[in-house]
Amino acid sequence: MTSSTSPAANWSYPTAIRFGAGRLSELPEACIAAGITRPLLVTDKGLKSMEITTRALDILDAAGLGRGFFAEVDPNPSEVNLEAGLKVYREGGHDGVIAFGGGSGLDLGKMVAFMAGQSRPVWDFEDIGDWWTRADPAGIAPIIAVPTTAGTGSEVGRASVITNSETHVKKIIFHPKVLPAVVICDPELTVGMPKHITAGTGLDAFAHCVEAFSSPHYHPMSHGIALEGMRLVIENLPRAYADGTDIEARANMMSAAAMGAVAFQKGLGAIHAMSHPVGAVYGTHHGTTNAVCMPAVLDLNAPAIRERFDRATGYLGIEGGFAGFRSFVTEFNEGFAIPKGLGEMGVGADRIDDLVDMALADPSCGGNPVELTKDNLKGLFDAAM
Ligand SMILES: NC(=O)c1ccc[n+]([C@@H]2O[C@H](COP(=O)([O-])OP(=O)(O)OC[C@H]3O[C@@H](n4cnc5c(N)ncnc54)[C@H](O)[C@@H]3O)[C@@H](O)[C@H]2O)c1
Ligand SMILES: [Fe+2]
């Protein structure tokens, strides 16, 4: 039944998630479930020789799975990493990918599986709303995702963020089949994150929930998930930061990360529109950059979001409605030693005009509750410096 006053939307919800401490041991079962007999484990350079990665490889070896290993992924991965990964995938005769790591390893692993059977360049699959005209679905290899940070939620997402190494622009590459077939969320894998990565990734999950909650698009399910995701971050990130071995807090942060990515189907906004160009040009950490941008964006968006935050703050355990939430965000950042401004992260005032142009072209602008213009984006960058 439809009516002219009924809202319309396209909704998509995630996939099979094996959640819990120690469940990395189920990697061989996950391969069987996904129909993979010869997986390529893809991860980033930082994780290449870490114990958790060796643990995953040992589990595959013990199960007799003829696995391959590709660990040449940079933070903010590029098409150069993708080409190298595809070469290893094809030469090794693999039939699926285990994307292992933070957002960088997960995104690149997902793209290796996606591009394995495509003949077009990856940039043809940019998320501009016409995916059904492009990919050859027969060419997409199955994906298992194993997050080792709790932030991006890329494990339950249908997109990867790939930086064009020539233009220094971050592009969102999207296809529904990029959604991993099986996800293993094992909070033990996140225990060894250094404090600044725990903070930066956790605040990425927070930014996803805040932006989704602020977005004007119609998606009540994601709206509710965003609210609970914010609560989980507020209550658990300080615990995980203070004691990295607090498994309950680590588990709640893993949930919050996945929830943030489900929630941002409702839309992202100016925080991500700003941090994508900053990350692409300066190579800054994504979640940390978001945290730096958030206070200025909340100030700009205040008239459009005040009422919904006034209603939510009681549930979040914050007094004073939206104003209380706004002050809380500054204190929250300070508690995690987040840089005070983009200048402190190396962003030059002379590049702001370029960053404004790049931010204006970012698809995240579409979910911001206040329409973004050259003028107000310039104001945001000035305020965030
Ligand atoms: N696909 C999406 O929906 C989506 C959403 C948000 C962000 N992203 C992208 O994800 C990337 C950022 O991902 P991230 O924030 O998870 O960081 P990351 O994957 O770049 O990892 C940051 C650093 O932490 C290290 N690391 C990862 N796990 C670790 C662990 N358990 N112990 C010790 N060190 C560990 C890595 O080696 C790396 O040096 C960016 O490229 C961003 O654009 C994607
Ligand atoms: Fe993000």
Image (tube, helix red, strand yellow):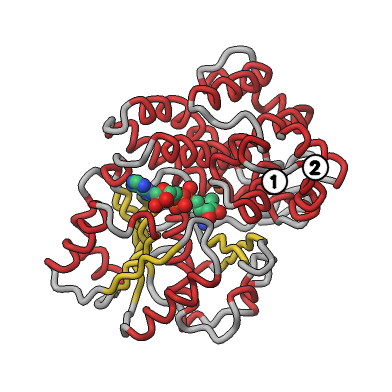
Q: Which image quadrant for residue 347?
A: top right
Q: Does mark 2's beta carbon lie closer than 8 Å to ligand 2?
A: no
- Please say if 314 is above or below 245: above
Q: Are marks 2 and 1 in contact (CB under 8 Å)?
A: yes
Earlier residue among tags 2 and 1:
1
Asked whether the viewer can see residue 144, the reply is yes
Query: Label for residue 274?
Result: 1
Residue 23 position, x and y percent, is: 22, 51
Badge 1 crowding class, 10 Å Cα cut-off, few under 14, some 14 to 19, many 20 or more, is many
Query: Label for residue 109?
Result: none
* Label 1 residue SS: helix
Residue 55 position, x and y percent, is: 20, 56
* Residue at the disc numbered 2: 377
Comparing 159 with 34, the one in front is 159
Instruction: Give, as a three-letter code, the residue at label 1.
Output: Met
* Label 2 residue SS: helix
Task: Describe residue 50's horizontal placement relative to residue 102 as left or right.
Answer: left
Separation of marks 2 and 1 at Cα, in angstroms: 8 Å
Task: Describe residue 363's horizontal placement relative to residue 236 as left or right.
Answer: right
Comparing 186 with 289, the one in front is 289
Instruction: Give, as a three-letter code, the residue at label 2.
Output: Leu
Residue 353 position, x and y percent, is: 82, 49
Q: Residue at x 37, y 79 (%)?
A: 88
Q: How many marks?
A: 2
Q: Residue at x 66, y 56 (%)?
A: 1
Badge 2 crowding class, 10 Å Cα cut-off, few under 14, some 14 to 19, many 20 or more, is many
Residue with the most extreme left position: 62
- Please say if 113 is above or below 293: below
Asked whether the viewer can see residue 267, the reply is no
- Please say if 83 is above or below 213: below
